[in-house]
Amino acid sequence: MNREDDLVKLARQLRWQLGENFHDKLVEGIYADAHQIVRDAVQRQESGATPLDIKIDRIVTSKRFGFPIMFALLALVLWLTVVGANYPSAWLHELLIGKLYPLLHAAAGRLHLSPGLAGMLIDGMYLSTAWVISVMLPPMAIFFPLFTLLEDLGYLPRVAFNLDRVFRGVGAHGKQALTMTMGFGCNAAGVIATRIIDSPRERLIAIITNNFSLCNGRWPLQILLATIFIGALVPAQWSGLAAMAAVVGIAMLGIAFMFLSSWLLSRTALRGEVSSFHLELPPYRPPRIWKTIYTSLMDRTLIVLWRAIIFAAPAGILIWVVSNIQIHGVPLAARITDALDPIGWWMGLNGIILLAYIIAIPANELVIPAILMLTVLIHHHTAGVTLFEPGQTTQVATLLRQNGWTLLTAVNLMLFSLLHNPCSTTIYTIYKETGSVKWTAMAVLLPLLLGILITVLIAFFWRL
Amino acid sequence: MRPVWTHIIIALLAATITGLVLRRRRRHPRIVIEDILKWLYHHDTDDAAGVAARIRRELGIRPRVLQKALQAMEAEQLIHTGPKGRSTLTQKGRDYALKIIRIHRLYEKYLAEKTGFHKREWHHLAEKMEHRLSSDDVHTMESVLGYPVFDPHGDPIPTATGELAAIPGRPLAELHSGDSGQIVHIEDEPPAHYDQILQAHIHIGSGIQVTGRTDSEIVFTAEGITHRLPLAVAQNITVHTKPDTDQPPVIRLSALPPGQTATIAGISRECRGQTRRRLLDLGFVPGATVRIALDNPLGDPIAYLIKDTVIALRRDEADKILITP
């Protein structure tokens, strides 16, 4: 008994003498031993890093060529996506909505479905899903493989390397440049891409701020509104340019907000999260083109698309139901928009836009069709309306102007489209990636509150 | 058009937010007592008259609150008031104070190892948590951290039984030209002095060599960098002087010139937790050779070639890797 006590006492005394960092020393010693063993046992040809790699790296990370090469490649990828997606989008549209849609209606008529059920399924569910697919699938099927090719080649880590200084300034990781760019394709994919950031704090920042990248589903709305309202401000020959500049301006504003909120987050809510930086620059290798295209289609494009469809189909039903159910002769949608109108007024928007945003939580692509459809329904009392076709810009322009849309409405809607909650697919992805209700709520509320604040402020000063 | 209820809601929201901002927390009587105990433990002074005034000033306690707290402490036999009204800690009071100090230093260790809070924030956070953690929490924390003996500033952590290691060494301000040794402790109070030490990027565990001193300043080199500190600030750095420093001089990886190859000597004690393990995983281990692979167009981070791999590190990390050139 006594001996044991003495032993424990001795152990305690010796523990003091070990000093503070004996754990570290121990680990360091094990690593150093391993290093020694490898050096003794492994023979290698004297090569170091291959000279070609270093030569390429010297160019793509040089002061003179580093940034021009980066911006040129990014511009090329975006151009290929935007221009290239038009053609398959048109085909899909023609096939799904031009051909298949009337066939479905004919089939429903032959099966003697009740008009209500047929409307809900075909005009509601089918049409919204078809719309999402034709708008969303082609850009993603082009953008993601291109991006994955650059990744596979080994170029993307060099971009992170070049830009890290800029991102460090706001407390973020250089790799956030990549996840942000991915967000321009799809925020859900951008959030998944943050797995490449292995520092917990910087990863959370990248996840929460990804929504500030104007995603593929929001570009059509920006382009439509800029063409109608901003393009009209300047002489006709400049209108296309002015509209394009406005859309790019909104995207740039998104990047500015990304930096601002990253800076705020790293200094407030996230400052206690562990942060550690290192970045591996792997050797270049020839990309395996077919494998890359296959995996990026499977891993990124189809998964994102599938989730979007799951959410778009019920939303389509919902849109149809609120527009077609009547209470005492007034459509349900009209009652809701009336209630939302005061809030809309404060934000320089209107009740219809707010209702459209609530309905379109599943997918940003649904905002325009929902707005147009609700406008037609409520102001023209056309019964049994279906999803509107936003093909004819001039028709849409007339419709919107007739219903009291001004430049303020357009500007604030463009801003609100940039600054609002992520779509439900993205929210779900954020929850799965962070496993935390708190950070998911932060990612939802931060852009939404910012959007409300900014639109209210602009509306206030605009009306002075 | 402008609805009345919107104004009401906005007014209510504004009022709530203002209320939350303006609300001031009053310290719980127990927290006041614990703060006084800690103060008495650290200031074993004989000056009876000044004590009450100094406690009031340094801890920001109002006279009436102090009066009440001292009475309660007397009743609980935490302090003993002598003939001249001088309060000294009883054994029970000393144990209590040590318990609070133990929690404080363990918590600072926890913040350093397991979270990303900046050094500057540790003290403030630990000041709050030392009053809140239960002894179960403390025990869990201690075992998770591997029963540490020193906190990240180099202060000894009292054990559960109240034992306390002594820090060997002398204040840097007392050293003379030619003295050398190792920094074993950096005091984090007062904040103004601590900020100066942080801004100089002086790291705990660094070997130093004093190269000169004047009446107001001391000049020394640490990890290849020459520092010049006012004596008042140098008083807050404790150095364990060693007569025989036959170890080769080390510099920081961030100071490695392009084109030169160096051997890694180790990782600074200032580098902790996940970052430290990552650097070891990547191959920054004693004995490995390293050189610069790529410069950065914006100056930071720099890519290093280590074990045939190109790894980019920011200056902050490269500062904490020590090399022999």
Image: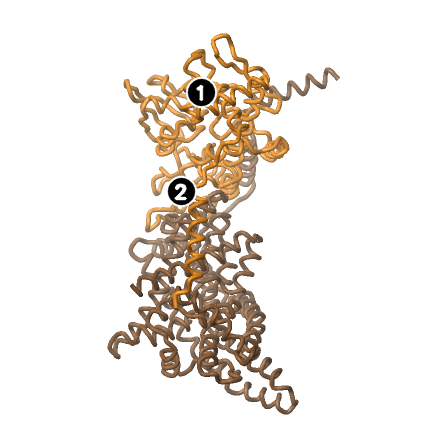
Chain colours: A brown, B orange
The label number, if any, that marks residue B291 in the structure image:
2
Mark 2, residues whose alpha carbon is within 10 Å: few (<14), some, or many (≥20)? some
User: Which of A159/A121 is in front?
Assistant: A121
Name the residue beneath numbered marker 1.
Answer: B240
In the displayed orientation, state which residue is furthest to the right: A1
Chain letter, disc 1 residue:
B
Q: Secondary structure at mark 2?
A: strand
The residue positioned 53% from the left and 25% from the top of the image is B34
Q: How many marks?
A: 2
The residue positioned 39% from the left and 75% from the top of the image is A83
Looking at the picture, which amino acid does disc 2 mark? Arg
Looking at the picture, which amino acid does disc 1 mark? His
Task: Give how far apart the Cα atoms at labels 2 and 1 are.
Answer: 32 Å
Q: Earlier in the sequence, mark 2 or mark 1?
A: 1
Residue A411 coordinates in the image, percent (x, y): 35, 68
Depth check, mark 2 against mark 1: the one in front is 1
Chain letter, disc 2 residue:
B
User: Which of A263/A323 is in front?
Assistant: A323
